[in-house]
Image (spheres, rainbow, N blue to C red):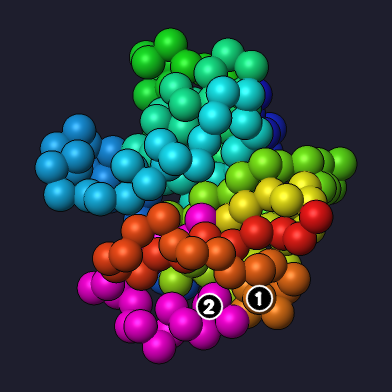
Amino acid sequence: MASTNENVEAANEPARGWAHVCPWWIGWLLASPVRRLFDGAAPLLDGLVRPGTTVLEPGPGMGYFSLKLARLVGPAGRVVCVDPQPKMIAGLEKRARRAGLAERVEALTCTLDHERLAPRAATFDLAVAIYMVHEVPDKEAFLRRIATLLRPGGRLLIVEPKGHVTPAAFAATIALAEAAGLRALPPPARKGLTALLEKPA
């Protein structure tokens, strides 16, 4: 597993501008297997991810969805997880190693505008932003960056929590994604705040 935790002291500072980011210590609770009993987002991935897929996952926390993605992409695929909180990334790396999936997961302690992601423009088949877009301080820049990183024909799955995000706020997020050049597709689920978008080929 590759990691970009070289500058540990600087990385351990709170992410600047991320006032509403989920605290790292909640990451262990969110990664609990008990979550399967009430979280309906994970099944959405089954129809979107095929073996060999290259997936970008911003805000993975400690990898609740990352490990499922790693299993779905198979040995030939790759899941690139990007989170500004080093303790989240450390927890994700630990869980990936225990699951025997470390070789399929690349964990980066940074944000999407980090220079290490620049060479990967137009290379990702799928980006998944699950329960995290509402935490991003500049959603417009975030969505434009994802659009840049997706290959032509690549897709973006957005899922937001109803308890934290209103339908109006979610609609505004989708409008920003469309302004970034992504095209809305029929969502993979009829319930909740879920959207699937595609970068035109």
Q: Residue at x 43, y 84 (%)?
A: 169
Q: Position of residue 10 (x, y in %)?
A: 63, 48
From the image, tell me which residue sits under label 1: 178
Task: Classify mark 1: helix, strand or loop.
Answer: helix
Q: Is residue 105 above or below residue 162?
A: above
Q: Position of residue 114 (x, y in %)?
A: 75, 51
Which picture quadrant has residue 4? top right
**Rendered-image quadrant of the C terminus:** bottom right
171 part of magenta stretch: yes
* Residue found at the very far bottom of the displayed protein: 168
Can residue 14 be seen at all in this image of the molecule? Answer: no
Q: Residue at x 14, y 37 (%)?
A: 34
* Residue found at the very far front of the displayed protein: 186
Mark 2 or 1, nearer chain start? 2
Horizontal arrangement in the rendering, residue 88 relative to residue 76 (left or right): left
How many labels were placed on the picture? 2
Q: Which mark is residue 39?
A: none
Which is more toward the observer, 80 or 111?
80
Q: Residues within 10 Å of mark 1 (few under 14, many from 20)?
A: some
Q: Residue at x 58, y 56 (%)?
A: 156
From the image, tell me which residue sits under label 2: 173
Q: Which residues are magenta?
A: 157-175
Q: Position of residue 16 (x, y in %)?
A: 59, 66
Which picture quadrant has residue 23? bottom left
Q: Is residue 120 above or below residue 52?
A: below
Q: Position of residue 166 (x, y in %)?
A: 33, 83
Horizontal arrangement in the rendering, residue 96 relative to residue 1 (left or right): left
Q: Is residue 146 above or below residue 100?
A: below
